[in-house]
Image (tube, rainbow, N blue to C red):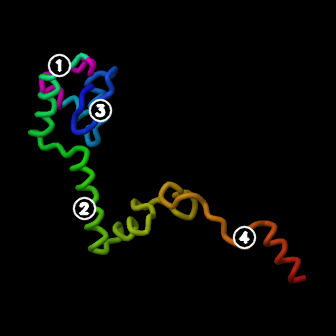
Amino acid sequence: MSRIEGVDLPVEKRVEVALTYVRGIGPNLAKKIIAESGVSPEIRVKDLSEEQVSKIREVIQKGGYRVEGELAAETATNIKRLKEIGSYRGLRHARGLPVRGQRTKTNARTRRGRKMAIAGTSKSAIAAKKSEKT
């Protein structure tokens, strides 16, 4: 099993696809890394030699690509900076709301979480209020 940047690559997949399991490496960057390291993109991860794995690691490190922990840390510092300067995007991050202009009247459940029941808004509660008034 090959470990690159702290990620176990899937053994049965081709190297080109397996590299995309590392956060920060997409299909295009994977192709570029493989071309630079001189490894065949068709070879399976289980067939890689230690020498080929070390070449891939070296290309990732020397290429200056931000992957895994370094990428996550950079993203976190960018969000923290937005919060500190008090920008609109920073406020949206702080409040846990969508940041990129999506609507929030309906939808936005991914950011806001599950629906919360509000007391007195169910059909039976509304009917009970109407009967009280009359």
Q: CA distance from mark 3 to mark 4?
A: 50 Å
In the picture, measured across the screen, residue 113 lies left or right of residue 12, that is: right
Q: Which of the pair 100/43 is nearer the observer?
A: 43
Residue at figure coordinates x 24%, y 55% from the top left = 73
Q: Amino acid at mark 2?
A: Thr
**Is 45 contained in the magenta span?**
yes
The mark closer to the camera, 4 or 1, is: 1
- Span shown in magenta: 33-46
Q: CA distance from mark 4 to mark 1?
A: 65 Å
Q: Residue furthest bottom?
A: 133
Residue 26 appears in the picture as rendered: no
Q: CA distance from mark 2 to mark 3?
A: 26 Å
Q: Position of residue 116 (x, y in %)?
A: 62, 64
Q: Position of residue 35 (x, y in %)?
A: 15, 26
**Is 85 contained in the magenta span?**
no
Q: Are marks 2 and 1 in contact (CB under 8 Å)?
A: no
Disc assigned to residue 121? 4
Q: Residue furthest right?
A: 134
Disc assigned to residue 77? 2
Q: Position of residue 6 (x, y in %)?
A: 25, 39
Q: Amino acid at mark 4?
A: Thr
* Residue that numbered label 1 is attached to: 49
Q: Are marks 2 and 3 in contact (CB under 8 Å)?
A: no
Q: Which of the pair 17/57 is nearer the observer?
A: 57
Q: Position of residue 11 (x, y in %)?
A: 31, 23
The mark closer to the camera, 3 or 4, is: 3
Q: CA distance from mark 2 to mark 1?
A: 37 Å
The mark closer to the camera, 2 or 3, is: 3
Q: Amino acid at mark 3?
A: Asp
